Amino acid sequence: MPTVSMKVNGKPVSGEVEGRTLLVQFLRESLGLTGTHVGCDTSQCGACVVHVDGESVKACSVFALGCEGAEVATIEGMAEPDGTLSPLQQAFQDHHGLQCGFCTPGMVMSAADLLAKNANPTEGEIRDWLEGDICRCTGYHNIVKAIQAAAATQAGRAHAAE
Ligand code: FES
Ligand code: FES
């Protein structure tokens, strides 16, 4: 079987995969990074969103071999090494942006990409961005509030640093 190598959350990793092995399978089954969820396996629900070379990607829609040499970021890499949540994760907690939590890793990774591209998104822009992320608990209002709060926190920090 071919070997694939990439960096995941800043750490070099490699493993044998089949040509058909999806990135999400490699992350979960080979690396044990089960924070990335599988809700549909057909590129519809967004539970599997990770970042590949800085872009949010549905990890069930790309082959592991296609990520050779890539920088991959998963939900496990969002918090600080001491467990302190990222501002975005903290905002999800503070604003009740999760219920069962199944969609949450994908929501957080999608939202992180949005805020990296657009530091001050409108409610409409957030809702449009999350079109490919499904919450089976239908907690969208609080997810949007959490992302707005994280954007405000981010803006406050940037302002304070000026
Ligand atoms: S598991 Fe990838 S989009 Fe649903
Ligand atoms: S919190 Fe349950 S699926 Fe979104």
Image (tube, rainbow, N blue to C red):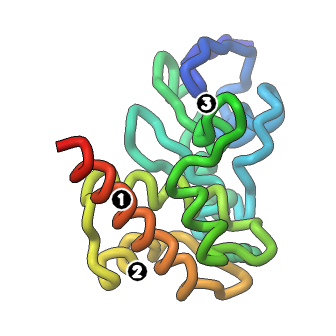
**Quarter where residue 150 is shown:** bottom left
Label 2 sits on a secondary structure element that is: helix
Residue nearest the observer in this picture, 142 or 9: 142
**Above-or-below relation of 90 to 66:** below
Task: Please give the name of the residue rendered at 40% of the width and 80% of the height, measured from the top-left corner.
Answer: 127
Q: Which mark is residue 64?
A: 3
- In this view, the mark in front (3 or 1): 1
Q: How crowded is mark 2: few (under 14 residues within 10 Å), some or many (20 or more)?
A: some
Badge 3 vs badge 1, beta-carbon distance below 8 Å: no
Q: Which of marks 3 and 1 is nearer the N terminus?
A: 3
Quadrant where the image shows the N terminus: top right
Side of 108 relative to 41 (left or right): left
Return the x and y of residue 149 as percentages of the image width and height.
43, 70
Side of 103 relative to 158 (left or right): right
Amino acid of disc 1: Leu
Quadrant observed for ligand 2 in the rendered image: bottom right
Return the x and y of residue 111 as percentages of the image width and height.
45, 61
**Quarter where residue 32 is shown:** top right
Label 3 sits on a secondary structure element that is: helix
Task: Please give the name of the residue rendered at 22% of the width and 52% of the height, measured from the top-left corner.
Answer: 159
Residue 43 in view of the camera: no
Amino acid of disc 3: Ala
Label 1 sits on a secondary structure element that is: helix
Q: Residues within 10 Å of mark 3 (few under 14, many from 20)?
A: many
Spatial CA span between label 3 and label 1: 24 Å
**In this figure, which residue is indicated by the disc labeled 1?**
114
Task: Please give the name of the residue rendered at 48% of the width and 42% of the height, measured from the top-left corner.
Answer: 51
**In this figure, which residue is indicated by the disc labeled 2?**
127
**Above-or-below relation of 138 to 107:** below
Return the x and y of residue 78 as percentages of the image width and height.
58, 41
Task: Please give the name of the residue rendered at 38% of the width and 38% of the height, measured from the top-left corner.
Answer: 54
